[in-house]
């Protein structure tokens, strides 16, 4: 794939980087990323991935834009209240970069549709807000050998990691860290707990950086590390995640 003149200008600040260059940009344009959730994490992530020229971006979200979303979900807009989030996100992203293909999936991710959805992409970015989706994605991405860049938010904190547990020893999955989801309703979601909106922006933007790094093979992967952002103390902590050799998700991958 040859870059057009317009693409040479649009991606000029990538192209002058030795670490990206024309080859890296062409790789981004050929990449297919599935983003789960067009919410607090998905908003900045989608905008930066589209701006960067990730060639095909899938968006999974069955929700509609609500006025309470707009405090943090910056891909949406006041005049789109009531619209499907995937349609609202497409309107914004098409204005950022009409050179990327957007696959809209206005469905709720479930065990019935997840494998088929994920199968069509190179990498999955989890910006969902619930444990059922987080564990479903962890297990499926491990089994289907797809890199998973996952993030989670609490009112003043964010967590971020990359999982490539299908690579075997030294590559843990989310279940290696937390074997089972917490009992339902013990951990409140953003809707109930509240969140300082810009915290979602920081973490979703970090998530976009990690996605681009994985696609380009740049720097050190977060694979095996949990990054915690503590907004109130303005601190970042890194925790090493050990591979659990009895982990049910990893065991399935090892025998796949
Ligand atoms: Zn595991």
Image: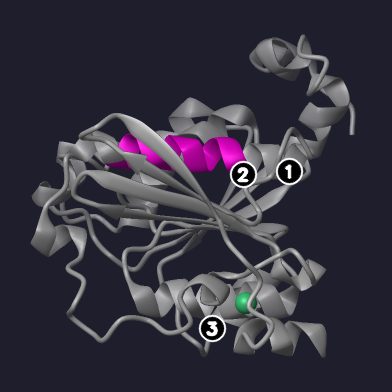
**For this rendering, which residue is in front, 194 or 96?**
194
Residue 202 appears at what percent x and percent y?
Answer: 36, 34
Q: Which residue is mark 1?
A: 215
The answer to whether residue 139 is left or right of residue 231 is right
Residue at position x 31%, y 52% from top?
39
Front tag of 1 and 3: 1
| Colouring scheme, one of rainbow, by chain, secondary structure, one colour | one colour
Query: Which label sits on residue 113?
Result: 3
Q: Around disc 1, counting alpha carbons within 10 Å, would you say few (fewer than 14), some (14 to 19), or many (20 or more)? A: many
Distance between the alpha carbons at the discs numbered 1 and 3: 25 Å
Query: Does the magenta segment cover residue 180?
Result: no
Region rendered in magenta: 200-210
Q: Is residue 110 left or right of residue 124?
A: left
Q: Quadrant of ligand 1?
A: bottom right
Q: Kindly state the secondary structure of the residue where label 3 is placed.
A: loop
Q: Along the polypeptide, which appears first: circle 2 or circle 3?
A: 3
Task: Kindly identify the residue that appears in the image at 14 percent across and 54 percent down.
Answer: 66
Q: Secondary structure at mark 1?
A: helix
Left or right of residue 220, residue 175 in this image: left
Q: Residue 133 — which label?
A: none
Quadrant placement of the C terminus: bottom right
Frontmost residue, 17 versus 243: 243
Q: In the rendered image, which residue does mark 2 sit on?
A: 211
- Residue at horizontal 58 percent and vertical 61 percent from the top: 241
Q: Which quarter of the figure has residue 224?
A: bottom right
Q: Position of residue 158 (x, y in %)?
A: 34, 47
Q: Please provide percent x and percent y for residue 118.
A: 63, 70
Of 252 and 179, the residue lying toward us: 179
Tell whether label 3 touches label 1 (CB within 8 Å): no
Quarter of the image for residue 196 reads top left
Q: Are marks 1 and 2 in contact (CB under 8 Å)?
A: yes
């Amino acid at each position: 794939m040859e870059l057009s003149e317009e693409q040479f200008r649009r991606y000029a600040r990538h192209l002058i980087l030795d670490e990206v260059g024309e080859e890296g940009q062409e790789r981004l344009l050929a990449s297919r990323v599935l983003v789960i959730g067009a919410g607090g994490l998905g908003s900045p992530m989608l905008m930066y991935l589209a701006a960067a020229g990730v060639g095909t971006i899938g968006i999974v979200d069955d929700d509609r834009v609500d006025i309470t979303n707009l405090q943090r979900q910056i891909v949406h807009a006041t005049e789109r209240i009531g619209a499907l989030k995937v349609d609202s996100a497409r309107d914004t992203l098409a204005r950022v970069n009409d050179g990327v293909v957007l696959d809209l999936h206005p469905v709720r991710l479930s065990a019935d549709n997840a494998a088929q959805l994920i199968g069509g992409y190179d990498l999955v970015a989890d910006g969902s807000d619930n444990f059922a989706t987080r564990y479903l994605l962890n297990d499926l991405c491990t089994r289907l050998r797809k890199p998973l860049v996952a993030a989670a938010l609490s009112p003043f904190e964010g967590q971020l990691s990359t999982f490539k547990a299908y690579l075997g020893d030294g590559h843990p999955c989310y279940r290696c860290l937390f074997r089972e989801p917490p009992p339902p309703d013990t951990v409140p979601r953003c809707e109930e707990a509240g969140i300082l909106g810009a915290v979602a922006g920081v973490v979703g933007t970090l998530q976009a950086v990690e996605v681009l790094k994985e696609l380009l093979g740049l720097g050190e992967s977060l694979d095996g590390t949990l990054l915690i952002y503590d907004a109130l103390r303005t601190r970042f902590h890194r925790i090493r995640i050990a591979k659990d050799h009895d982990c049910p998700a990893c065991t399935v991958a090892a025998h796949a």
